[in-house]
Image: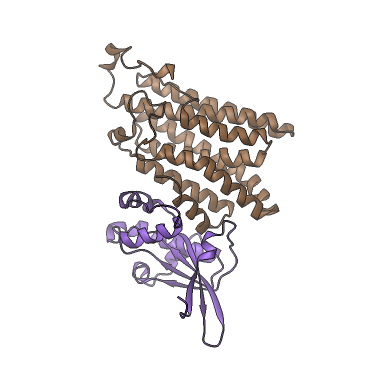
């Protein structure tokens, strides 16, 4: 949180030169950068429970890729004149990280993939793609390009997860269901139209969601697109659509 | 629905394991009012969850991809039974006009894909879906 404090006041002279939407973008970039750093930490932890050297190398490569994404978001912030803070200890991100680490503690490789690739990456792909459409210049291109890269991650994991589901479908679906309530409940609270449980500890001032209309976005759009992507990913995995829809409708709003 | 020949099999909608077994028929439809859409979502949420506020429903429903919502079993007087699914295209009730034609056709096509995936041998389009397709069933065949 330290890096968030007094961000605006510490550079009053520079604020005058900022675009009117720069501080909105700062928060959008901060959320994205935090998510990428959490993903990098998750993949690094995943490498620690892999036994196959190829899987270890794959996880570490993904971790490096996520760090690269975080760096790209930081660079976009500099380009528009704002520093991009991050806070992997912020309450929602911390809960997501803890859910992932519980899977690590159980050496549950498949559970880790479900949390990171199916849930967190669905959220990233959908929201980055929407941001990519409205982001000006290189900022929009960066979000769109990273969305495409994250989608490739999902495709890579899908083959592993489909094969796992084939082995024992009821067991696999029960695992997804349990992780859904653990992880997607937190994501749904993050994506709710308003942060009713207090400050998210990533935005630099008040909640950025009401200001998103200033960059032609809305929290409702990001939530809708993310849940749609999540449902489609579960469809591709083969889970019954009526079951997953019921799960999604039961999430907090 | 005790004396009816058709019933909604609620057990199927709450079974987290679900099933994608072949069905005999599929019914494709959509909700014509936000009240009706709210009822569908309330059914899916289950009685233990409070109903969603209407503004949240209006935010969420347009993003739901077409999919089966419930299973239906129909019996004849001589005891034959047919199993079907109701597939909602989730066309938002306020997007039925021509401005949304492309999106709505895509939704009906997505619903048809769900019917194909479920193995339905007979698919029934609702009144609006039929008009939307206007007999051009090629519109349904893409990607199926």
Q: Residue furthest bottom?
A: B78
- Apparent side of residue A54 relative to residue B49 in the rendered image (left or right): right
Image: A173 above or below A221:
below
Is there any visible trace of residue A75 in the rendered image?
A: yes
Image: B93 above or below B131:
above
Q: Determine which quarter of the picture holds residue B28.
A: bottom left
What is the quadrant of the N terminus of chain B in the image?
bottom left
User: Total label count?
Assistant: 0
Q: Which colouring convention does the figure follow?
A: by chain
Percent x, y of residue B127: 35, 72
Residue under the image location 30 percent in, 58 percent down: B95
Image: B100 above or below A176:
below
Task: From the viewer's side, name the closer residue of A99 and A211.
Answer: A99
Chain A display color: brown
Percent x, y of residue A152: 55, 40
- Apparent side of residue A53 relative to residue B11 in the rendered image (left or right): right
Task: From the viewer's side, name the closer residue of B75 and A143.
Answer: B75
Percent x, y of residue A27: 37, 27
Is there any visible trace of residue A215 in the rendered image?
A: no
Q: Determine which quarter of the picture holds residue B24.
A: bottom right
Q: Residue furthest front?
A: B48
Residue under the image location 59 percent in, 62 percent down: B19
Percent x, y of residue A177: 57, 49
Chain B display color: purple
Image: A143 above or below B25:
above
């Amino acid at each position: 949180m330290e890096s968030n404090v007094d961000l605006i006041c510490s550079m009053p002279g520079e604020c005058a030169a900022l675009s009117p939407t720069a501080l909105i973008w700062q928060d959008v970039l901060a959320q994205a950068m935090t998510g990428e750093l959490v993903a990098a930490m998750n993949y690094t932890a995943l490498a620690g429970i892999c036994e196959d050297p190829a899987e270890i190398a794959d996880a570490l490569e993904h971790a490096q890729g996520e760090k690269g994404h975080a760096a790209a978001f930081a660079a976009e912030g500099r380009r528009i004149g704002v520093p991009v803070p991050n806070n992997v200890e912020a309450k929602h991100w911390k809960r997501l990280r803890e859910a992932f680490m519980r899977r690590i503690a159980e050496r549950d490789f498949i559970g880790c993939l479900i949390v990171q690739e199916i849930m967190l990456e669905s959220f990233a792909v959908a929201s980055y793609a929407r941001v990519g459409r409205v982001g000006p210049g290189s900022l929009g291109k960066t979000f769109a390009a990273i969305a495409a890269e994250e989608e490739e991650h999902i495709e890579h994991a899908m083959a592993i997860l489909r094969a796992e589901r084939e082995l024992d479908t009821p067991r696999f679906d029960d695992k997804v269901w349990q992780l859904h309530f653990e992880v997607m409940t937190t994501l749904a609270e993050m994506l709710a139209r308003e942060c009713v449980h207090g400050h998210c500890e990533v935005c630099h001032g008040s909640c950025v969601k009401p200001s998103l209309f200033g960059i032609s976005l809305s929290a409702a759009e990001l939530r809708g697109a993310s849940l749609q992507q999540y449902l489609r990913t579960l469809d591709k995995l083969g889970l019954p659509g009526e079951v997953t829809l019921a799960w999604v409708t039961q999430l907090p709003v | 629905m005790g004396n009816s020949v058709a019933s909604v099999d609620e057990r199927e909608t709450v079974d987290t394991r679900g099933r994608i077994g072949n069905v005999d028929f599929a019914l494709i439809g959509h909700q014509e009012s936000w009240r009706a859409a709210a009822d569908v979502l309330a059914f899916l949420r289950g009685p233990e969850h409070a109903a969603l506020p209407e503004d949240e429903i209006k935010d969420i429903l347009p993003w739901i991809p077409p999919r089966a919502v419930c299973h239906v079993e129909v019996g004849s007087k001589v005891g034959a039974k047919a199993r079907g699914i109701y597939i909602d295209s989730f066309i938002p009730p306020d997007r039925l006009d021509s401005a949304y034609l492309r999106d709505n056709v895509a939704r009906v096509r997505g619903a048809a894909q769900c019917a194909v995936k479920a193995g339905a041998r007979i698919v029934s389009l609702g009144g609006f879906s039929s008009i939307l397709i206007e007999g051009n069933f090629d519109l349904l065949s893409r990607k199926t």
